[in-house]
Image (cartoon, rainbow, N blue to C red):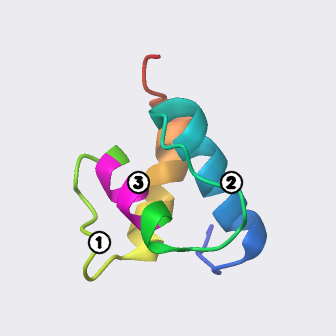
Amino acid sequence: PVMWRDSKSQIVLVQEVLNEWYGAGLEIDGKMGSRTKAAWSNASGGEFRESGFDYVAAFKWLLDTVAFNPPNK
């Protein structure tokens, strides 16, 4: 199974998807900062709240979205 490992490459993927599909305007730096977490939470419709953020569930959501349910631009 795909796991969240908090690696720079995973964070870059998350940031690039959030920028391209959700207009997040994040710096692509591979660091999980508060702006990245907030954008990720907002993109999911608030499903993953910034406080108590569940990275494993949020990463699975992101991969599912990329593979099967990309947002309409």
Q: What residue type is labelled 1?
A: Glu
User: Does dot 1 land on a helix, a strand or a loop?
Assistant: loop
Residue 41 higher or lower than 23, as above or below? below
Highlighted magenta segment, given as a residue range = 37-42
Identify the residue position indicated by label 1 in the image. 50
The x, y position of residue 36, in whole percent, is: 49, 62
Quadrant holding the N terminus: bottom right
Q: Position of residue 35 (x, y in %)?
A: 45, 63
Mark toward the viewer: 2 or 3: 3
Tell me where residue 38 appears, x and y as whole percent.
36, 61
Of callouts 2 and 1, the N-terminal one: 2
Using the image, determine if residue 46 lies above or below residue 16: below
Residue at the image point whose x is 43% and y is 17% from the top: 72
Residue lying at the far top in this picture: please name it: 73
Q: Local crowd at mark 3 within 10 Å, few (<14), some, or many (≥20)?
A: many
Q: Is residue 61 magenta?
A: no
- Under mark 3, the amino acid is Ala
SS at mark 3? Answer: helix
- Residue at horizontal 60%, vertical 55%? 14
Q: Is residue 49 left or right of residue 10?
A: left
Residue at the spot 49% in from the left edge and 51% down from the top edge = 62
Q: Pointer 2: what residue?
A: 13
Task: Quickly name the residue at label 3.
Answer: 39
**Crowdedness near tag 2: few (<14), some (14–19) or many (≥20) residues, C-alpha within 10 Å:** some
Magenta span: predominant SS is helix
- Say what secondary structure mark 2 lies in: helix
Q: Distance between the residues labelled 2 and 1?
A: 19 Å
Seen in the picture, residue 62 relative to 9 is either above or below; the reply is: above
